[in-house]
Amino acid sequence: MNTTIDLLKTRRSAPALSLVEPGPTPAELETLLSIASRVPDHGKLAPFRFILFQGEGRVRASEIIAEVFIAQHPDPDQDQLRIERKRLALAPLVIAVVSRAGPHEKIPEWEQIMTAGAVCMNLIVAANSLGFATVWLTEWYAYDRAVLDRLGVAANEKIAGFVHIGRNPNPREDRARPALAEIVTTFGA
């Protein structure tokens, strides 16, 4: 085997609560974003962009999520409110991959959406190859217009994922994966 295959065979998501410092250095972050951007992109549209949540920005973004949650749930459960106040503040770095897919005369919108998904996966693989642990999440706030507006996501944009990046020295158990016999067919057979 080679190291890429080994990484892909063993990569696991890590709970956001388990991700600790140190996060990526500026040089590592540039590498991660450069690799994440190297995806199939029919028409070279770059139908994606990044929002970085690090340092105090993570805390402020989490407060925005909590404020919107309170507005929608005027008497919130305090345990749930504590969760909302930490949504983007758990890992040292959270990168929102924003899909900018839209109508185009030649490039189907679906292909543009898949490009944003490929960006998320490239980001995860790159981060894991540098020794980080990751988890790709969306949750309710990724679809809530009040939150998105306050995070700077335009009306024509959507969150493809919030990729949480940090360190996790703990072993992670694998989850059950589909049996190939259940998901593979051969055309004409």
Image: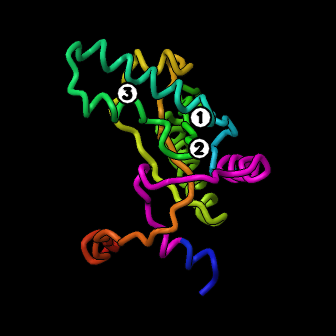
Q: Residue 109, image x and y in percent?
A: 50, 33
Of the numbered discs 1 and 2, the one sitting upstream in the chain is 1
Front residue of this view, candidates 64 and 8: 64
Say few, some or many: other residues with alpha carbon within 10 Å of mark 3 (under 14 / 14 to 19 / 20 or more): few
Disc 3 marks which amino acid? Answer: Tyr
Tag shown at residue 143:
3
Residue 48 in sight in this render: no
Residue, x 43% and y 49% (percent of image)? 16
Whether residue 31 is in magenta: the answer is yes
Image side of residue 54 versus residue 146, left or right: right
Q: Residue 29, image x and y in percent?
A: 71, 48
Image side of residue 96 versus residue 64, left or right: right
* Residues under numbered marks 2 and 3 in contact, where contact means CB atoms less than 8 Å apart: no
Disc 1 marks which amino acid? Answer: Phe
Mark 1 secondary-structure assignment: strand
Q: Residue 45, image x and y in percent?
A: 67, 35
Tag shown at residue 93:
2
Say few, some or many: other residues with alpha carbon within 10 Å of mark 1 (under 14 / 14 to 19 / 20 or more): many
- What is the magenta range? 8-37
Residue 68 in sight in this render: yes
Q: What residue does disc 1 label?
A: 53
Q: CA distance from mark 2 to mark 3?
A: 20 Å
Q: Is residue 43 above or below residue 148?
A: below
Residue, x 31% and y 68% (percent of image)? 175
Mark 3 secondary-structure assignment: loop
Of the numbered discs 2 and 3, the one sitting upstream in the chain is 2
Q: Is residue 48 above or below residue 92?
A: above
